[in-house]
Image (cartoon, rainbow, N blue to C red):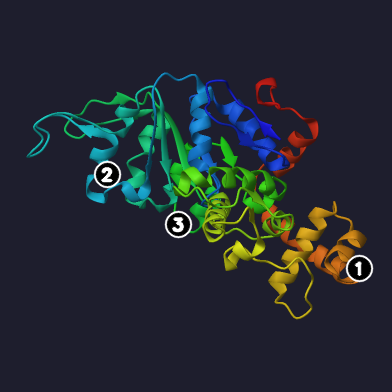
Amino acid sequence: MQVPLHPALLGSVVALSAAMTEVLYRIHQFAQARTPVVMVGETGTGKSFFAHILHQLSGRTGRFAEITAGEIDGGLAHDQLFGHVRGSFTGAMQRRLGLFADAGDGTLLLDDFHLLPRGQQALLLRAFDRCEYRPVGTDRDLPVTCRLVVGVQRDLDALVADGTMLLDLRYRLGQCVIRLPRLEERRGEIAVFSERFLEECPADTDVKDGPQRFARDVVPVLEAGTYPGNLRDLRERIRAAYLLGRGSEELEIEHLPDAARVSLRYEPRADHATQLRVVQWALWRTGDHVGKAAELIGASRNTVSVLRAELRQKQVRSLSGETGSARRDDAAASGRLPRELRA
């Protein structure tokens, strides 16, 4: 099932999970405000994509602009961000608009913000707090007219705790946070994404003689996989399999790259992480039914019960540092998505 968004948005998102329902809800609630928004998600979870959706739904007339921390030159950060006036330094023959002015009334995404040195973060305190900035070579403050979106890979409080983010800046970012789930938290959507990525392979690779469909046993293997790079990881694995399967009508397990070939059976001699992954997949596949999961993977009920308890403990620990986790579950249960975000 695809969840269509605003008619102005080119494309759609897949939202079958509670976590993605909450993402869409928060995007809708935050879209038309001028408040800065923080996108928290690992690489490949779609921070840029969803920031663009936020912009599309905002009604802003300006453009969507983005820059990553790695593109900001330390010595020129002030100039890149806020621009300079003519004659402000040797060689400044004309005025330069910085990123803030260039985005106009649009949206500016500062991605990988956690990689920005603290000294450069300090340049942004006034912009986030008072919605003002000062170009190089002038004592005149200009208003921030664009919507600011910050992309980070970890929770803000964790970044402050390890000294990566300035405490003052963290509080200026407020509480408008959108957490983007890992692909393994959206396991029920892997089949949909896999079909989409396979359909896109001819255009993406300029190769037309690859498989057009998956063999029957491939999608369960993909669903059981682990994806450190999330959706980007899944897409690249399918592209590789498409190329390795050239000349075949169906994409077979043998075409998958080694990292994507996983066993769907419980192996007592396998490493513990692999055992956990297999049990986790089986529980998901059977709706958390211990007996059916054990039968599916060839394990004992006791083994599945023990590993299931371990998985739950890990889940509780991972959620303990997140804000709004209960709210996410409530949102999914209540079906509170606005009408234009519903299927």
- Name the residue carrying label 1: 301
Residue extending farthest front: 247
- Whether residues under marks 3 and 2 lie with C-beta atoms below 8 angstroms apart, the answer is no
Q: Residues within 10 Å of mark 3 (few under 14, many from 20)?
A: few
214 sits to left or right of 131: right
Residue extending farthest bottom: 269
Q: Residue at x 50, y 53 (%)?
A: 159
Disc on the earlier residue, 2 or 1: 2
Image quarter of residue 60: top left
Q: Residues within 10 Å of mark 1 (few under 14, many from 20)?
A: some
229 sits to left or right of 300: left
Task: Report the front residue among 226 and 25.
Answer: 226
- Whether residues under marks 2 and 1 lie with C-beta atoms below 8 angstroms apart, the answer is no
**Residue 303 placed where, x, y %?**
86, 71
Q: CA distance from mark 3 to mark 1?
A: 45 Å
Q: Amino acid at mark 1?
A: Arg
Q: Name above or below for residue 138 compared with residue 264.
A: above
Quadrant (top left/top right/bottom left/bottom right) for the N terminus: top right
Q: How many marks?
A: 3
Disc on the earlier residue, 3 or 1: 3
- Name the residue carrying label 3: 163
Image quarter of residue 141: top left
SS at mark 1 in the image:
helix
- Name the residue carrying label 2: 77
Q: Residue at x 63, y 65 (%)?
A: 254
Q: Amino acid at mark 2?
A: Ala
**Residue 62 placed where, x, y %?**
39, 22
Task: Report the front residue among 238 and 269.
Answer: 238
Q: CA distance from mark 2 to mark 1?
A: 58 Å
- Whether residues under marks 3 and 1 lie with C-beta atoms below 8 angstroms apart, the answer is no
